[in-house]
């Protein structure tokens, strides 16, 4: 037993206290067991080449140990600006889908677009897909005025 003029602590009590602190510190506050994985796979973007007025279908398979909170396709345009599109789950499957098309008030950017799907489960865990691409062809050149 350790004794100081104003404090008496047994060695076993001190060991219990230190062990408890170490165990609690190692828990990370997560509580509960199981994996926290969110998987996003099989990203498909079709068609691969479109005209400015065409739509692109983006699909991905999403699986999570906890319920899925959101699935978003992030489209990066040729000028590096991004658009986030909420995806919806196809009935009876793990496939999530969204149709991406230029909005009427947008200026169409010809070039290569990249797509990545991000899923978040109800516990805040995040999974991301590989990156897919598609290309938008430029508008046809204006008719030439004859000689």
Image (tube, rainbow, N blue to C red):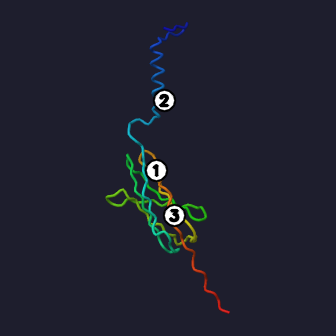
Q: How would you rate the neighbour count of disc 2 (Cα within 10 Å): few for under 14, some for 14-19, many for 20 or more?
A: few
Give the farthest residue toward the left. 92
Residue placed at 44% from the left, 37% from the top?
30
Q: Label 1 belongs to which residue?
A: 127
Residue depth check, mark 1 versus mark 3: number of the one nearer the observer: 3
Pointer 1 or 3: first along the chain = 1
Measured Cα–Cα span from mark 2 to mark 1: 26 Å
Residue closest to the far bottom = 147
Give the quarter of the figure containing the C terminus: bottom right
Indicate the position of residue 108 as horizontal and vertical percent values.
56, 71
- Depicted 1 relative to depicted 34: above or below: above
The residue to which callout 2 is attached is 25
Residue that numbered label 3 is attached to: 133
Q: Which of the 4 quarters of the picture holds residue 110?
A: bottom right
For marks 2 and 1, the one nearer the N-term is 2
What distance separates the C-alpha of mark 1 from that of mark 3? 19 Å
| x then y, percent, for residue 29 | 45, 34
Q: Residues within 10 Å of mark 3 (few under 14, many from 20)?
A: some
Q: Residue 4: where, in percent of width, then height?
A: 55, 8
Residue 142 in the image: above or below residue 40: below
Q: Are marks 1 and 3 in contact (CB under 8 Å)?
A: no
Q: For the residue labelled by badge 3, is the local secondary structure a helix, a strand or a loop? A: strand
On the image, the x and y values in percent for residue 35 come to 40, 42
Q: Nearer the viewer, residue 3 or 140?
A: 140
**Front tag of 2 and 3:** 3
Residue at the outermost right position:
147
State the SS at label 2.
helix
Q: Secondary structure at mark 1?
A: strand
Closer-to-camera residue (101/61): 61
């Amino acid at each position: 037993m350790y004794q100081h003029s104003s404090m008496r602590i047994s060695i076993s009590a001190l060991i219990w206290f230190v062990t408890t602190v170490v165990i609690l510190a190692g828990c990370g506050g997560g509580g509960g067991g199981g994996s926290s994985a969110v998987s996003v796979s099989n990203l498909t973007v079709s068609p691969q080449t479109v005209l400015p007025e065409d739509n692109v279908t983006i699909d991905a398979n999403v699986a999570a140990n906890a319920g899925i909170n959101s699935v978003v396709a992030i489209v990066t345009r040729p000028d590096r600006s991004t658009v986030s599109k909420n995806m919806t789950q196809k009935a009876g499957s793990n496939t999530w889908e969204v149709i991406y098309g230029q909005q009427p008030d947008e200026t169409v950017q010809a070039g290569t677009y990249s797509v990545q799907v991000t899923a978040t489960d109800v516990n805040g865990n995040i999974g991301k897909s590989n990156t897919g691409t598609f290309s938008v062809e430029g508008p046809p050149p204006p008719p030439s005025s004859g000689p």
